[in-house]
Image (cartoon, rainbow, N blue to C red):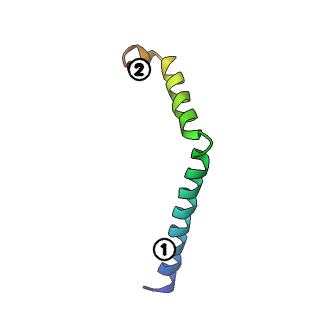
Amino acid sequence: MNSLSVWAWMFLFGHLVWATGFMFLISWHGYWQELIETLAWAHERTPLANLIRWRDK
């Protein structure tokens, strides 16, 4: 392995750690739940909603 590939792996690993940490940071604030609820709300207002419906539990 040359020095360039070592730096490339460090770069990729650093971004993986950053992205994973950021994902957990925003999940603590209910970000994913809000995103899913927003998508469901928007889906109910499209013509596609007449064809595809899901049932609540």
Q: Residue at x 53, y 74 (%)?
A: 10
Label 2 or label 1, whichever lies nearer to me, is 2
Q: Residue at x 47, y 79 (%)?
A: 5
In the rendered image, residue 2, in percent from the top left (x then y), is placed at 46, 86
Discs 2, 1 touching: Cβ within 8 Å? no
Residue 49's image quarter?
A: top left
Judge whether 33 appears above or below 42 on screen: below
User: Residue lying farthest top?
Assistant: 50
Residue 28's image quarter?
A: top right
User: Residue lying farthest bottom?
Assistant: 2
Q: Residue at x 52, y 17 (%)?
A: 45
Q: Nearer the viewer, residue 16 or 24?
A: 24
How many angstroms separate mark 2 from mark 1 (CA)?
45 Å
In the rendered image, residue 53, in percent from the top left (x then y), is placed at 38, 18
Marks 2 and 1, the one that precedes in the sequence: 1
Q: Quadrant of the C terminus?
A: top left
Q: Which residue is mark 2?
A: 56
**Secondary structure at numbered mark 1:** helix
Judge whether 29 appears above or below 14 on screen: above
**Secondary structure at numbered mark 2:** loop
In the rendered image, residue 51, in percent from the top left (x then y), is placed at 36, 16
Disc 1 packing (10 Å; few <14; some 14–19; many ≥20): few
Q: Quadrant of the N terminus?
A: bottom left
Which residue type carries mark 1?
Trp
- Checking the image for residue 19, the label placed there is none
Q: Which residue is mark 1?
A: 9
Judge whether 44 appears above or below 29 on screen: above
